[in-house]
Amino acid sequence: MQTKLIRASVAHFPAETSMPDTDIAVFPDGALVIRGEKILAVGEYSAQTAAYPEAKQINCQGKWLLPGFIDSHLHFPQTAIMGSYGEQLLTWLNTFTFPAEQRFADEQHASVMAQVFLGELLKNGTTSALVFSSVHKGATNALFSAAKAMNMTLVAGKVCMDRHCPDALSDTAASAVADSHALIERWHDQGRLRYAITPRFAPTSSDQQLAALGELAQAYPDVFIQTHLSENQQEVAWVKSLFPDSRYYLDVYDSHNMVRPRAVFGHCLHLEAQEWQHLSRQGATAAFCPSSNLFLGSGLFNMQAAASHGVNVALATDIGAGTSFSMLSTYADAYRTCQLQGTPLSPLQGLYMTTQGAAIAHQLDHEIGNLNPGTYADFVLLEPRCTPLSKLRLTPTADISDVVFALAMLGDERAVAQTWIAGHCCYDRDRNSDS
């Protein structure tokens, strides 16, 4: 098995931290050493080349090598509706989302779209994602099959909804559990894949369906749970009318045993203090989706409230109301969101929330999110001076904080030179320039 040494400027967060601006390991002339699927070592180039003289060297000087990005909330079937003229959330679902998802009853269509979807992730440096499929079991199989062929970490689940949706997309409490159970048995912990029990959101699941999915979650305590929470004020009011016995929105899920570690709640824009406290107490995660929140006019995520309550927060694109697969662009919108509230989000805070911070929130930091020896060799190579404007903005000696900020604000997918998964280069900008 060949040992490879990639020479580049290298940066990552080796451990959990509340101070990413200082607790980052940076090697301006660094090297990552890999053998097979895993990382052997990381550090200064001079030390690593002396320790591994037999390694095949790959010279990427001038580029920054970072852990592959983690997208913590997005929708596979919504890829084709990105950039559709914006509406508020509930209208968006009926106008764009539900018609697009009905096409995924065709497994051939789902297989084709899985390749497009995963290809866009790679093009933007994303190596791991938490993904909503459609209501169709076959589409979820297609997505998992495509991810398995790439040997990537993918957490995904069949959407479950048995009311307030088109008949063509409606399942039942029994069929949702049966399909989810079969998918768990087939895909969860198969290679690098994990399953997520996925009620779309409280309004589209009856109390009977939520109860049945909660029982399934208890039977599989290490399976993920993903859904939406308090994205839109009209939605929050709707939930209150549908579940009058619940104290607040999160209580709907909590009463069905769905608030726990590895439970990821998208948006979390209009939470009460008790909800923040309970998310923290239970070790659940809020997925901060700034691009889609701005696009749909849903509101501004309160990063200060999340931090003060110690809630896990991970960044997410929320494709397709999100308008870019790029986690760098997503950080740019997160920065703008926080700026509007007088609580700026630094570039390294943003980078942490897309790498090690997300991995820790999802209990996957022993595998992804960092460049520690023994983890999978999932990484991205960024080209700081990738466009005429970025060449003007960034000097060859710019530090990692400035590089991340400038590329988030001024860059595009051309900033991603290569994306590697499990020691294999899955995307190369120069080879895939026409894709």
Image (tube, rainbow, N blue to C red):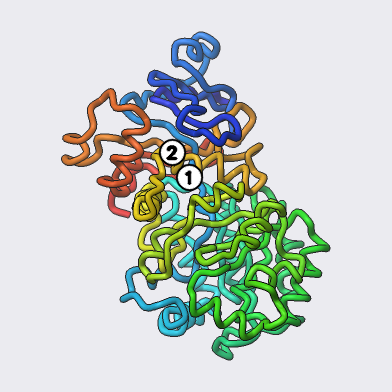
| Residues at marks 2 and 1 touching, judged by CB atoms closer than 8 Å | yes
Q: Specify the amino acid type for callout 2.
A: Val
Q: Which residue is denoted by mark 2 in the rendering? A: 380
**Residue at coordinates 76% horizontally, 81% vertically from top-left?**
174
Q: Would you say 183 lies left or right of 21 here? A: right
**Residue at coordinates 72% horizontally, 65% vertically from top-left?**
258
Q: Position of residue 266 (x, y in %)?
A: 55, 63
Along the viewing direction, whichever of 204 and 151 lies nearer the viewer: 204
Report the residue that reaches farthest toward the bottom: 167
Position of 138 relative to 220 (above/below): below
Residue 203: quarter of image: bottom right
Q: Position of residue 378 (x, y in %)?
A: 52, 39
Residue 69 is marked as 1
Dot 2 or dot 1: first in sequence order is 1
**Residue at coordinates 48% horizontally, 45% vertically from top-left?**
69
Report the residue that reaches farthest toward the top: 50
